[in-house]
């Protein structure tokens, strides 16, 4: 289900709305959006929730605004201002150089106000208690980063990033490298993998007819057709033989019976072992 989240509600709020609209408790998502952010929220419904891990690493595309000269404790516009600095001496060449330096992989420190766990506790809970919070940096990839409009102090940008990348942290780090500080003042997610926000509906407009076939979540995998005997074996958790080369050991393979997605298996030697079942008996 592709939902267009407005600014304001949490991602969990949107999930609750969709649960009520569909009459289905098993609803999850492929990556949260902060309350102030809007855009594409990909929800997984019913048995398709089992497939979420296979799409969790899809890259995500965003449009947003970085405000130069102001640093906040949340790295976005909802936080308290902790520092200000002049930005007027930044040249176009300097800006281009700094933006270019973030393309590719870099070690990114998640925001203090984030869901990252520190010693078993969410970072934002520690931060709300007034503790100094510095989550450990982790490798992320900025696949594309373009300044669409440099109407300083606002930088309108477009970016495609790896899963787990914080755009708030990216804004903060760009400001730090420019020497003036910055925060993320607006954000809109426009794509998750092959899925686009222009195909999404408002949470209140969700209907059962708009739930898509779960096969979209495994379209990037190798596909294996199974006959009736193999389908019966798979839905009962029994492995089936590898019949053709292609999958490496441990690689997931989508199992189909005609147009029906049966589940996902992974190769173990010369067998495909069922890992996740979507179809019923």
Image (cartoon, rainbow, N blue to C red):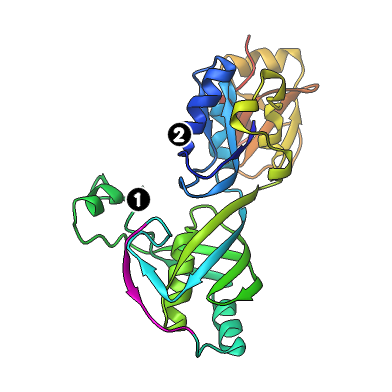
As drawn, the residue found furthest toward the top would be 281
> Between residues 281 and 233, which one lies in front from this camera angle?
281
In the picture of the structure, the residue carrying the numbered disc 1 is: 116
Q: Which of the two labelled residues, at mark 1 and mark 2, occupies the earlier sequence position?
A: 2
* For discs 1 and 2, the disc positioned in front in the rendered view: 2
The magenta stretch spans which residues? 79-87
Near mark 1 (Cα within 10 A), the count class, few <14, some 14-19 or many ≥20, is: some
Q: Is residue 254 above or below residue 71?
A: above
Q: Position of residue 63 (x, y in %)?
A: 62, 58
Residue 219 in view, yes or no: yes
Q: Position of residue 234 (x, y in %)?
A: 63, 19
Seen in the image, is 244 located left or right of residue 163? right
In the picture of the structure, the residue carrying the numbered disc 2 is: 12
Q: Position of residue 159 (x, y in %)?
A: 62, 62
Residue 196 in view, yes or no: no
Q: Secondary structure at mark 1?
A: loop
Q: Is residue 266 above or below residue 35?
A: above
Q: Secondary structure at mark 2?
A: helix
Estimate the spatial distance between the alpha carbons at disc 1 and disc 2, rounded to whole Å: 17 Å
Q: Is residue 120 above or below residue 73?
A: above
């Amino acid at each position: 289900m592709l939902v267009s989240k407005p600014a304001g509600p949490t991602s969990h709020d949107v999930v609750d709305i969709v649960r009520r609209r569909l009459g289905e408790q098993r609803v999850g998502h492929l990556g949260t959006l902060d309350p102030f952010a809007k855009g594409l929220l990909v929800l997984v419904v019913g048995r398709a929730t089992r497939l979420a891990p296979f799409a969790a690493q899809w890259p995500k595309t965003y449009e947003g605004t970085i405000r130069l000269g102001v640093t906040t404790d949340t790295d976005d516009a909802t936080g308290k201002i902790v520092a200000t600095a002049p930005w007027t001496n930044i040249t176009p060449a300097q800006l281009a150089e700094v933006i270019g330096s973030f393309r590719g992989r870099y070690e990114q420190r998640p925001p203090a106000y984030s869901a990252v766990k520190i010693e078993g506790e969410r970072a934002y809970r520690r931060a709300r208690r007034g503790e100094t919070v510095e989550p450990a940096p982790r490798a992320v990839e900025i696949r594309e980063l373009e300044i669409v409009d440099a109407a300083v102090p606002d930088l309108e940008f477009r970016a495609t990033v790896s899963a787990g990348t914080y755009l708030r942290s990216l804004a903060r780090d760009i400001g730090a490298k420019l020497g003036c500080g910055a925060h993320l003042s607006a954000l809109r997610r426009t794509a998750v993998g092959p899925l686009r926000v222009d195909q999404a509906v408002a949470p209140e407009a969700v209907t059962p007819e708009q739930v898509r076939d779960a096969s979209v979540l495994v379209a990037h995998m190798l596909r294996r057709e199974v006959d009736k005997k193999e389908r019966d074996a798979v839905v009962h958790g029994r492995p089936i033989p590898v019949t053709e080369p292609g999958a490496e050991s441990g690689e997931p393979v989508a199992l189909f019976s005609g147009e029906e997605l049966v589940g996902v298996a992974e190769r173990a030697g010369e067998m495909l072992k069922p890992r996740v079942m979507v179809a019923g008996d």
